[in-house]
Amino acid sequence: MELVREGARLSRNQMANLAPYVIRGAFVATFMNKYSGLPMAITGTLASDSVNRRINETASFFTTATLPGALERFGPGFKAAAMVRLMHSMVRFNILKRVKKWDPAIYGIPIPQVDQMPAGTMARLPGRLQGHAQGPQAFHPQRAGHR
């Protein structure tokens, strides 16, 4: 859990300052394929009244995860993640059960986890690009999953 805490600490600044803007860009990017924006259109999330609220909720969710202790069991980030997972599973279930136009053979499963990850990791992109430009640094086996 110490590496999670360290990752959150290192991400905190970018998430607080960049996430609201980057997530707006990620929201626009959901329309670059034929299915990822469809659940939001079906559920009305893209209505003019709710789109800004949805973007702010998403930015707040990812920023909350970087707060001290947020990802500890029952911390605010842990609880927020559970709520997001529950909400997405309910949307997934209802779209598959009730929306006749949703064809899993064409669109796959609604709101796949892999499509959500860019929104949560994009705010770290400037730091990654800076690290890449600086070149290789010291290797830490424990951070690479080796023990």
Image (cartoon, helix red, strand yellow):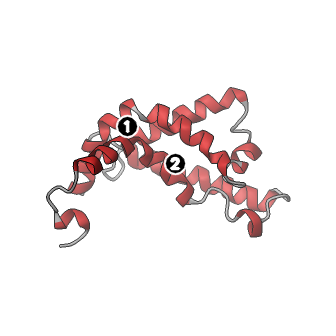
Residue drawn at point x = 56 percent, y = 53 percent: 86
Residue 46 location in percent, x, y?
Answer: 70, 37
Find the residue positioned furthest to the top: 49
Crowding at mark 1 (Cα within 10 Å: few <14, some 14-19, many 20+): many
Q: Return the x and y of residue 105 as percentages of the image width and height.
A: 76, 70
Please state if 68 lies on the left or on the right of 75 as rendered: left
Q: Secondary structure at mark 2?
A: helix
Q: Nearer the viewer, residue 67 or 82?
A: 67
Q: Quadrant of the C terminus?
A: bottom left
Give the residue pinned by disc 1: 15
The amino acid marked with disc number 2 is Met
The amino acid beneath tag 1 is Met
Q: Please state which of residues 107 and 31 is positioned toward the viewer in this rendering.
A: 31
Quarter assignment of residue 1: bottom left
> Is residue 96 positioned above or below 41 on the image?
below
| Residue 67 in sight | yes
Residue receiving disc 2: 83
51 is higher (above) or lower (below) than 138: above
